Image (cartoon, coloured by chain):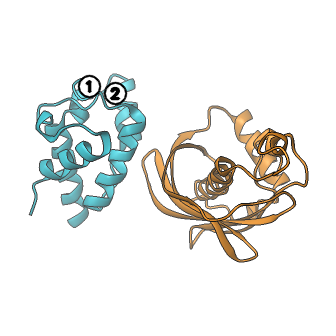
Chain colours: A orange, B cyan
Amino acid sequence: MRLEYFQMITRVVSFDAQARTLTAAADVPAESPVFEGHFPGYPLLPGVLMIEAMAQASGWLILGLNGLTAMPFLVGTNSTKMRDFVQPSTPLVVHAEMIGDGSGYAVTKAFITREGKKVAEAEIKFAVKTFPDPKFASMIREWGERLQFPFEKLETA
Amino acid sequence: MSSTFETVSKIISETCDIPLEKITSESHAIDDLGIDSLDFLDIAFAIDKAFGIKLPLEKWTQEVNEGKAKTEDYFVLGALCGKIDELVAAKGA
């Protein structure tokens, strides 16, 4: 995680196009300017960043399923719950499953676990828009490479 | 069993907080009901789920943008319900 850059996923652990699921590691850093304000002397990962982590894992799932052709944009969440506090230096696992998709939208169910115990969950909705140009597509692919996205499993149908 | 219009108007009312009585088959989703494009994604999701179809929203939008169709061909509720019925019939064919 690089909280101040809004990069919440450390690496993609698994992607299953058939099951329409993705798992990602999200390692909460020991230090970040975010913790200086949230909260002074009592650092906690903000709940909105847990939502963002679930949205980004879901985003990589959607990108994988559309063969890296269209970008998902967060437009809403339902049934969002924070179940526990998360401190710095905590390894998290983010799980995402596609539960609905259609023309220009996708809906996922996502949750975060710490040592197997759920700490957050949400149903997340996305608008999905075709990449604006090939340069953007290249940037996304390079980003995916940094996250060790398993490109050999891309859904290109 | 509810008619297509009853189901669609209920979805729109619940998704966009629009009183049911304001929604008629002549209502234009964008011009009369003020539904924006992101709200319409929510509505499309609910319609797809309720009828077991996939509304081709991107195709419709492209046709409107290219001048091949008018927004009222797809976004006036009576017309929208007609398109839904066609998609449901095509699914069962």
Q: Which residue is mark 2?
A: B64
Q: Which residue is mark 1?
A: B70
**Chain letter belonging to callout 2:** B
- Residue A61 in the image, given as x and y percentages of width and height: 63, 59
Amino acid at the residue labelled 2:
Val
Q: Indicate the quadrant containing the C terminus of chain B: top left, top right, bottom left or bottom right.
A: bottom left
- Circle nearer the N terminus (1, 2): 2
- Residue A86 in the image, given as x and y percentages of width and height: 75, 60
Residue at x 15%, y 36% (from the top left corner): B23
The answer to whether B60 appears left or right of A144 in the picture is left
- Residue A70 in the image, given as x and y percentages of width and height: 59, 44
> Which structural element holds mark 1?
loop
Nearer the observer, A83 or A111: A83
Residue contact between numbered discs 1 and 2, judged by CB atoms under 8 Å: yes
Residue at x 77%, y 59% (from the top left corner): A149
Q: Residue furthest front?
A: A41
Pointers 1 and 2 within a single chain: yes
The answer to whether A50 appears left or right of B10 in the picture is right
Q: Quadrant of residue A14?
A: bottom right
Between the residue at mark 1 and the residue at mark 2, the CA separation in whole angstroms equals 6 Å
Q: Quadrant of residue B30?
A: top left
> Which structural element holds mark 2?
helix
Vertical relation: A41 (above or below) A113:
above
Q: Residue furthest bottom?
A: A116
Residue at x 76%, y 63% (from the top left corner): A150
